C-alpha cells in the first residue's frame, strides 16, 4: 500500500465534503435525484494495514435492490497515492452517473454475453483479446437492474 488509510481519510474528507458527500464511519454518500454515490473504504480481513477503495453507485430510479454495501455497481480503485485515488474515484462517478452512457454500456454487455455465454467463458479456449470484456463493474448488476436501466 502506498498511502496509509488514516492519511487517505484525512486527505479525502474535506474534498468529498466539498462535493456534497456525507460521512458515516468509512463510507461517504451523496444523493442526487437519480443517483446515490458511495465512496467506501473497506478494511482487509487478511491484514489490518491493508484496505480497499470502492466507489459505487445506486440508481435511485430503479426498484432492483442494490448491494447494501456497494450499490448497484462499483469499482475497486487501486491504492496508489491519495491524489490519484480521489481523482480516479471522481472520474468514475462522473462517467457512470450518466444515464445515456450507462444504457449504452448495458446494451454492449448484453450483446457480449450473447456472443460469449457462460459455458464459453469458462472454457480454456475463450479468447478475451479477440472479444474484450465489457467493464467489470457491470457484472454486479442484476438482470432486473439491467432491464430497468434500459427503460430509463
Image (cartoon, helix red, strand yellow):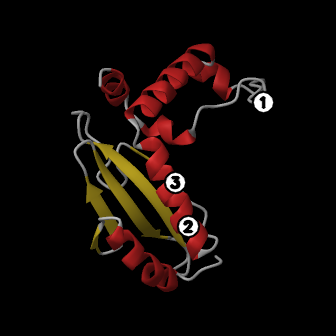
Residue 7, percent from left and from top: 51, 85
Contact (CB < 8 A) between labels 1 and 3? no
Residue at 48% across, 25% down: 104
Residue drawn where x is 24% and y is 33% of the image: 62
Give the answer, above or below, for where 93 lies relative to 86. Answer: above
**Judging from the image, what secondary structure is the residue with disc 2 in?**
helix
Q: Quadrant of the C terminus?
A: top left
Circle 3 residue: 91
User: Residue at left 53%, top 56%?
Assistant: 76
Quadrant occupied by the N terminus: bottom right
Q: Residue at x 78, y 30 (%)?
A: 129
Asked if marks 2 and 3 touch (Cβ < 8 Å), the reply is no
> Is residue 106 left or right of 81 when viewed as pictured?
left
Closest to the observer, 6 or 45: 6
Percent coordinates x, y for residue 137 in the rendering: 50, 42
Establish if 122 lies above or below 98: above
**x, y percent for residue 85:** 56, 67
Amino acid at each position: 500500500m502506498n498511502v496509509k488509510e488514516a492519511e487517505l481519510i484525512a486527505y479525502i474528507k474535506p474534498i468529498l465534503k466539498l462535493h456534497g458527500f456525507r460521512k458515516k464511519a468509512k463510507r461517504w454518500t451523496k444523493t442526487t435525484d437519480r443517483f446515490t454515490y458511495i465512496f467506501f473504504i473497506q478494511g482487509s480481513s487478511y491484514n489490518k494495514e491493508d484496505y480497499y477503495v470502492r466507489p459505487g453507485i445506486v440508481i435511485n430510479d430503479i426498484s432492483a435492490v442494490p448491494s447494501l454495501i456497494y450499490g448497484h455497481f462499483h469499482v475497486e480503485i487501486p491504492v496508489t497515492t491519495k491524489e490519484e485515488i480521489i481523482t480516479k474515484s471522481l472520474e468514475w462517478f462522473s462517467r457512470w452517473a450518466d444515464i445515456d452512457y450507462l444504457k449504452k454500456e448495458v446494451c454492449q454487455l448484453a450483446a457480449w454475453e450473447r456472443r460469449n455465454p457462460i459455458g464459453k467463458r469458462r472454457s480454456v479456449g475463450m479468447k478475451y483479446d479477440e472479444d474484450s470484456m465489457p467493464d467489470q463493474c457491470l457484472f454486479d448488476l442484476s438482470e432486473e437492474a439491467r432491464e430497468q436501466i434500459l427503460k430509463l
